[in-house]
Amino acid sequence: MIPEIQPLEHRSYLVDGEIKPWTGEIQDVYSTLSKTSGASYQKTRVGSVPNLGEKEALEALDAAYTAYDQGKGVWPTMKVKDRIECMTRFVEKMKEKREEVVELLKWEIIKNHNDAYKEFDRTIDYIYDTIEAYKDIDRDSGQFEKYQGVFAHIRRGPIGVVLCLGPYNYPLNETFSLLIPAIIMGNTAVFKPAKHGVLLISPLLEAFKESFPKGVVNIVFGRGRAIASPIMKSGKVDVLSLIGHSTSANALQELHPKANRLRTVYGLEAKNPGIVLKDADLDLTVAECISGTLSYNGQRCTALKILYLQETIKDAFLSKFTEAVDALAFGDPWDKNAFLTPLPEPGKVAYIQELIDDALAKGAKIMNKKGGQVSDNFIWPAVLYPVTKDMRVYKEEQFGPIVPVVSFDSIEHPLNDMAESDYGQQVSIFGRHHTKLARLIDILANLVCRVNLNSACQRGPDIYPFTGRKDSGQATLSVKDALRAFSIRTFLAFKENDINKQTVRDILDSNESNFLNTDFIL
């Protein structure tokens, strides 16, 4: 049952260590959840946020730029253990806001009960894992190397100012997978929350303010174009970190006046296939494909967005799979048993319907009985077969509850499709014949960045790499890899002689250098 909500009227933003009040234009925030249905259906207003513009965007950028101070600032030159203490203080304060943030996850992006709590708790775990990984990196670098009479003390250091833009589908976890490693490495950041999932950041502003030096984290609200464009045009951004679509990434990247100086850390779109071979375990495969295609209604870049079924297993799979799809529990986010929930994006139902209509007009059929049934802001997942290359759903990343199915005789069919695809994040392969699987794994590992054996595509565990080929991303966003993505190797070198040895020894004994030290962080 959908509860009552007191709209959250958020009227501030965080810049230069100050939570500044806002009295200007606002943006209303609506949830597609409603207590009414049918002809009387209407969205629920859940609050509002500031609609900041270019002036405030550049104010936030200047704060981050000043705090970094071309590498001379307090934060980039701080001892690693001190930055870790700041981050530990932040995560402890963040935990106090668990219930507030989870409730807003349910209202804003309509994440079911279990997934909403999972996103918050997983984010907490991610931060702790990042802290521990940074300790490991620092311990490993707290030593000297020697080659050809030259000593080197090599560490990872910050890059500069980061513009951080997160996605709506995981507005906490995915966003923080950018923001947290960026700032702990000594960078400063301007962060703009996603359009959906924007209010849930508001309970955390105080935690950011109290945990980090001024200017390290600056949080602004508003339209992406109004905020991000002038920031990129300034040329003061050193790292563009974005989870979203390649068109947005390309457009922003092109605005930077010195693109050669810009590092990009992207998590972008994907069209992850599931390939079901004739010897696949049917029950296991169906269960994994249900989770893979329809967790969070398929609104994940890691979702299985197209299924390839070997001809001899096609009928048996579709029979079990479509039955399982129609048996899924639907409800609002407060229903603890709900697997499927309403869709958070206005217009998403109409978009999914367009894809269905296009496929039907070109020869596909809806294979499950409930497929395509519409109720207010929800459309029941439609399993479409046979899907062909001339259909929109064949190539578009649908990002919603629709499952296109293709059958094949030769394994070359899905392999060629993947090779020709603009995407290359993950694949799931289902089967048991070790000889065939061995060959496929060797090929698939060069087409995507993660091959899942008899398992759905997914991001976690977060310690493992998460990246993509082609239009699916750049850099990696998983703990140690993310720390590397937001940093650069830098080092002190000195020739082996008595003067240098004594000088370095004196610096180490004095403990006056934050860079040149052999501290062991427990």
Image: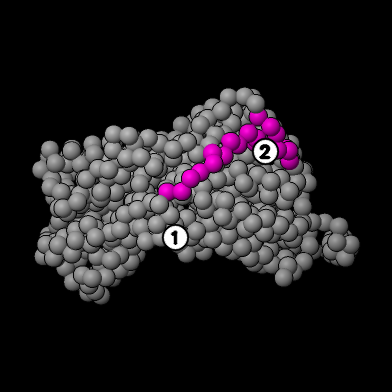
Query: Mark 2 or mark 1: which is in front?
Result: 1
The numbered mark at residue 84 is none
11 vs 286: above or below: above
Q: Is residue 151 visible?
A: yes
Amino acid on which disc 1 is placed? Asn
Label 2: element kind: strand
Residue at the spot x=25%, y=50% of the render? 381
Question: In the shown orientation, is residue 105 left or right of residue 424?
Answer: right
**Where are the magenta residues, as a range?**
2-22
Please indicate whether residue 33 sits to the left or right of residue 147 in the image: left
The residue depicted at 24 percent of the width and 39 percent of the height is: 353
In the image, residue 446 sits, relative to residue 43, either above or below, namely below
* Residue designated by label 2: 14
Within 10 angstroms of label 1, few (less than 14), some, or many (20 or more) residues?
A: some
Q: Which residue carries the number 1 mark?
A: 114
**Picture quadrant where residue 506 is located:** bottom right
Q: Position of residue 165 (x, y in %)?
A: 53, 41
**Residue 272 at x, y percent in the picture:** 32, 53
Which of these two is toward me, 319 or 6? 6
Using residue 194 as the reference point, say whether residue 304 is left or right of it.
left
Q: In the visual, does 383 lie left or right of 200?
A: left
Residue 134, image quadrant: bottom right
Q: Position of residue 112 (x, y in %)?
A: 41, 54
The answer to if 295 sits in the magenta stretch is no
Which residue is found at the position 73% from the left and 38% from the top?
A: 18
